[in-house]
């Protein structure tokens, strides 16, 4: 993986850890929070989308629309499950499980379906990232209460959707050559459209969530698309099986936020896992 791709992935990791921190603070927001975030993203990034269309032009509607609809469906499930996980579990548990399951499955899918062949260092780096993520997420500090087990379940389910949308979106921006900026904006807009019937029926709940979590909504609306657009650009420069595990550097940053700001437990075993993650990212960077 080249230097530019590595820098894009590292920047995406900072943005990704940041928006998950704010999503955890609004853990009780549910689907209303997801709709608000998607709708605000579509509005805030409209100038970026317009610039992308002016620069690259519009793709064929019959190709782009199907790709956006499938991606938006996967992302709706991802965001809703993630918020459910944050409502019952610690960020330092749900986040690493979701981010660990995702790249592990993404690498398998990319190798099997996209016929990518990562080298030995790439495979070892990806495995180290996955191992480090699970060491952090399943450390001795995790309580085994019913709520904790539920959070673990949501984390694993979220990871499965991460794997699916990662491979599908990589196909959209590589094989279908869809512009990443336009694709991500359309994804947010379509996600907001899909959830609009719910938002209309539950408008009082949506208004309450906006009042309580306005700052969190806007932070997620800004940082989430930024993080993912950076990843999509990286996928145009490096194989999915390299990018998907490398972006999990965000787990180290998220763990620090969960420990220092949210006050969650951070035992030594989780720090050891963070070192393993960093080692994996270094191997991916030189693969």
Image (cartoon, rainbow, N blue to C red):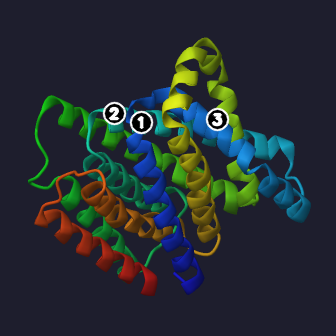
Instruction: Tell me which residue sits at (26%, 44%) in the image.
Output: 90
Instruction: Tell me which residue sits at (49%, 68%) in the image.
Output: 243
Dot 2: what SS? helix
The image quadrant of residue 88 is top left
Pointer 1 residue: 83
Q: In the image, is residue 107 above or below residue 79?
A: below
Dot 1: what SS? helix
Which of the labelled discs sits on residue 87, or is there none?
A: 2
Q: Can you give x and y, in whole percent of width and height, for residue 142 in the image?
A: 14, 47
On the question of residue 68 being in view, the answer is no
> Comparing marks 1 and 3, which lies closer to the viewer?
1
Q: In the image, is residue 46 above or below residue 117?
A: above
| 116 left or right, relative to 284 | right
- Give whichever of 265, 73 is nearer the camera: 265
Give yes or no for contact between labels 1 and 3 (Cβ–Cβ under 8 Å): no
Q: Earlier in the sequence, mark 2 or mark 3?
A: 2
On the question of residue 89 being in view, the answer is yes
> Comparing marks 2 and 3, which lies closer to the viewer?
2
Pointer 3 residue: 191
Q: Can you give x and y, in whole percent of width and height, for residue 166 in the image?
A: 53, 54
Mark 3 crowdedness (10 Å alpha carbons): few <14, some 14-19, many ≥20: many
Q: Can you give x and y, in whole percent of width and height, for residue 39 in the image?
A: 67, 36
Q: In the image, is residue 87 above or below residue 15?
A: above
Mark 1 crowdedness (10 Å alpha carbons): few <14, some 14-19, many ≥20: many
- Give whichever of 22, 118 is nearer the camera: 22
Q: Can you give x and y, in whole percent of width and height, for residue 238 in the image?
A: 57, 74
> How far is disc 2 from disc 3 in space, using C-alphas?
21 Å
């Amino acid at each position: 993986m080249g230097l530019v791709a590595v820098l894009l992935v590292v920047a995406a990791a900072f943005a990704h850890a940041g928006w998950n921190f704010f999503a955890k603070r609004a853990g009780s927001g549910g689907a209303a929070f997801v709709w608000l975030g998607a709708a605000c993203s579509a509005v805030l990034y409209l100038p970026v989308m317009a610039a992308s269309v002016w620069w690259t032009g519009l793709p064929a509607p019959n190709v782009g629309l199907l790709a956006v609809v499938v991606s938006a469906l996967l992302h709706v499930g991802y965001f809703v499950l993630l918020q459910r996980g944050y409502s019952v579990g610690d960020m330092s548990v749900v986040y690493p499980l979701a981010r660990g399951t995702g790249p592990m499955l993404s690498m398998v899918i990319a190798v099997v379906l996209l016929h990518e062949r990562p080298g030995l260092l790439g495979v070892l780096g990806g495995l180290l990232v996955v191992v480090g993520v699970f060491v952090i997420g399943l450390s001795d500090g995790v309580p085994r209460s019913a709520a904790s087990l539920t959070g673990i379940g949501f984390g694993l389910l979220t990871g499965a959707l991460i794997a699916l949308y990662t491979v599908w979106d990589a196909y959209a921006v590589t094989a279908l050559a869809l512009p990443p900026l336009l694709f991500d904006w359309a994804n947010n807009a379509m996600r907001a459209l899909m959830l609009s019937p719910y938002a209309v029926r539950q408008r009082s709940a949506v208004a309450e969530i906006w009042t309580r979590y306005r700052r969190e909504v806007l932070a997620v609306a800004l940082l989430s698309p930024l993080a993912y657009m950076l990843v999509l650009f990286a996928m145009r420069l490096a194989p999915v099986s390299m990018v998907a595990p490398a972006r999990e550097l965000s787990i180290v940053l998220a763990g620090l936020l969960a420990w220092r700001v949210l006050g969650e437990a951070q035992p030594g075993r989780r720090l050891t896992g963070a070192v393993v993650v960093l080692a994996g990212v270094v191997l991916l960077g030189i693969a």
